[in-house]
Amino acid sequence: MDAARIAELLGPFLGDSPLNSSQLTAVSTYLDLLLRWNAKMNLTSLRDPAEIITRHFGESFFLAGQAVAAGREVTCVDVGSGAGFPGLPLKLYRPRVRLTLVEAQYRKAIFLREVIRALDLAGAEVFAGRAEEMAANPTPAADLVTMRAVERFEEVLPVAARLVRQDQNEVGRAGALALLIGAAGADRIAQLLPGFRWGEPMLVPQSSGRLLLLGWLETGKVKQPESSQ
């Protein structure tokens, strides 16, 4: 798919901050890799390139624009990355993000590493394991933890919350969670994670039921994992 068509499809998700030419080229390369690998393994059930751009890339870029301010250098952990959404588009849109993709399935982890290599994404890495394994070991907590379409969502959500940084940054905030979720499950999030202060749900463009939820950790409210040692 050419850059002009990609830019047109992504326009509603990016508003006044469209992708530049190098970012559009990276999306095209990523899309080609995804389609090629998807012919051999199940990375996404979608087959139409335009639908992949709007559903996967569009949602991810929308999250990136809302969750990370331009120019900020933050750490991000993307839990259950799968085919790399939303983590890799977030890294493309906000290059100063230091990204860790968490993916337990071996072949998907290999795919993610191939995308990082092909796009020459410095500051991006893959943790080939489960979020529970990451949370069980002493590891620097993240400024932002993202989740989208993760299996066992309600079980993994508290684990993801423990990966969020508790100490406050220069503007007095601890770390945050960014969740892409169906409207049906959004009402339960505050109940499942009472230690977070949640903003108003944001409807994903061109969607009737997909929401972006941003929640900031209230310092000391979420117990951090103990060392496995």
Image (spheres, rainbow, N blue to C red):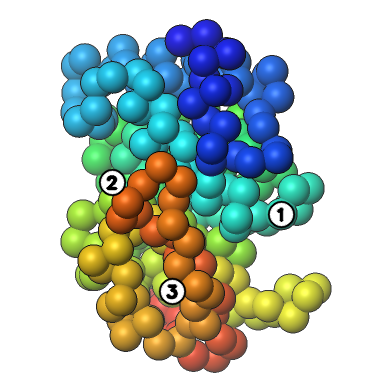
Q: Do tag 3 and tag 1 residues touch (Cβ < 8 Å)?
A: no
Location of residue 86 with respect to 108 vertically, above or below: below
The numbered disc on residue 69 is 1
* Horizontal arrangement in the rendering, residue 7 relative to residue 134 (left or right): right
- Tell me the crowding category of disc 1: few under 14, some 14 to 19, or many 20 or more residues within 10 angstroms, Cα based: few
Q: Amino acid at mark 3?
A: Arg
| Earlier residue among tags 3 and 1 | 1
Residue 20 or 202: which is nearer the viewer?
202
Q: Amino acid at mark 2?
A: Ala
Measuring from the top left, give residue 139's x and y in whole percent. 52, 64
Quadrant in which the C terminus appears: bottom left
**What element does badge 1 sit on?**
loop
Per the image, the residue denoted by label 2 is 104
- The residue at 56%/86% (across/down) is 218
- Tell me the crowding category of disc 2: few under 14, some 14 to 19, or many 20 or more residues within 10 angstroms, Cα based: some
**What element does badge 2 sit on?**
loop
Location of residue 212 with respect to 17 vertically, above or below: below
Q: How many marks?
A: 3
- Tell me the crowding category of disc 3: few under 14, some 14 to 19, or many 20 or more residues within 10 angstroms, Cα based: many
Q: Distance of mark 1 from mark 2, alpha carbons?
A: 29 Å
| Earlier residue among tags 1 and 2 | 1
Q: Do tag 3 and tag 2 residues touch (Cβ < 8 Å)?
A: no
Q: Distance of mark 3 from mark 2, alpha carbons?
A: 18 Å
Per the image, the residue denoted by label 3 is 162
Measuring from the top left, give residue 41's x and y in whole percent. 19, 23
Quarter of image, res 107:
top left
- The residue at 41%/42% (across/down) is 206
Q: Point out the residue furthest to the top here.
A: 2
Q: Which circle, 3 or 1, is nearer the viewer?
A: 1
Q: Distance of mark 3 from mark 1, alpha carbons?
A: 23 Å
| Earlier residue among tags 3 and 2 | 2
* Horizontal arrangement in the rendering, residue 131 relative to residue 203 (left or right): left
